[in-house]
Amino acid sequence: MRATLRTIAACALLVALAVTAAAADDVLFRAMQDELDRSMSELRIEDMAPPYFLSYRLQDNHIATVDARYGALVHSQVTNQRYLYVECRVGDPSFDNSNFVATWADLNRQRTGVVEED
């Protein structure tokens, strides 16, 4: 049992290292990391507490839709979508209620981004 857990932990560590290495080479990831660092150090509003948490999440979707009737292709479409999620928390971390969900809309706070071919 312990050997299995060690194997799973080692595989998880290798995957995490591979993802980190791949992200370091990604231009978009580096730009987001630079903006995150800049925002955390310089984002200030007069007479307000600075943010204690800031995150960016970019979701790229590549969607292929195919319609067929009686074995014949009727319609096909490929769509690219990019969504940006930004979360900024200001104030006291001990008073954080960011996991509160009042409506379904609270679960889907996204902004449509520009999709450009790489």
Image: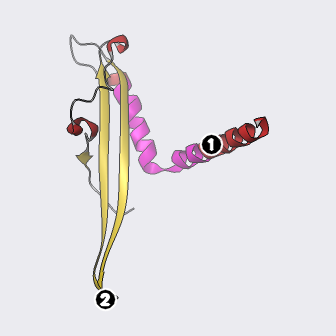
9 vs 45, nearest the viewer = 9
Image quadrant assignment for residue 100: top left
Say the numbered circle drawn on residue 95: none
Left of 33 or right of it: where is 90?
Answer: left
Question: Measuring 27% from the left and 19% from the top, which residue is drawn there?
Answer: 44
Q: Which residues are magenta?
A: 18-40
- The label shown at residue 70 is 2
Q: Please, what is the three-letter code of the amino acid marked with disc 2?
A: Tyr
Q: Secondary structure at mark 2?
A: loop
Residue in the picture at 59% in, 46% down: 21
Asked whether 95 falls inside the magenta stretch, the response is: no
Counting residues from the start of the chain, the first of labels 1 and 2 encountered is 1
Task: Tell me whether the residue at label 1 lies in contact with that at label 2, contact meaning CB atoms closer than 8 angstroms.
Answer: no
Find residue 70 and report its horizontal and vertical position in percent.
31, 89
Of helix, strand and loop, which mostly describes the magenta segment? Answer: helix
At label 1, which amino acid type do we have? Answer: Leu
Measured along the vertical axis of the image, is residue 75 above or below residue 80? below
**Residue 81 against residue 19 in the figure, above or below:** below
Identity of the residue drawn at 41% across and 30% down:
37
Mark 1 and mark 2: Cα distance apart in space: 47 Å
**Residue toward you, 85 or 27:** 85
Q: Which residue is mark 1?
A: 17
Name, please, the residue furthest toward the right.
3
The quadrant the C terminus occupies is bottom left
Horizontal arrangement in the rendering, residue 113 relative to residue 31 (left or right): left
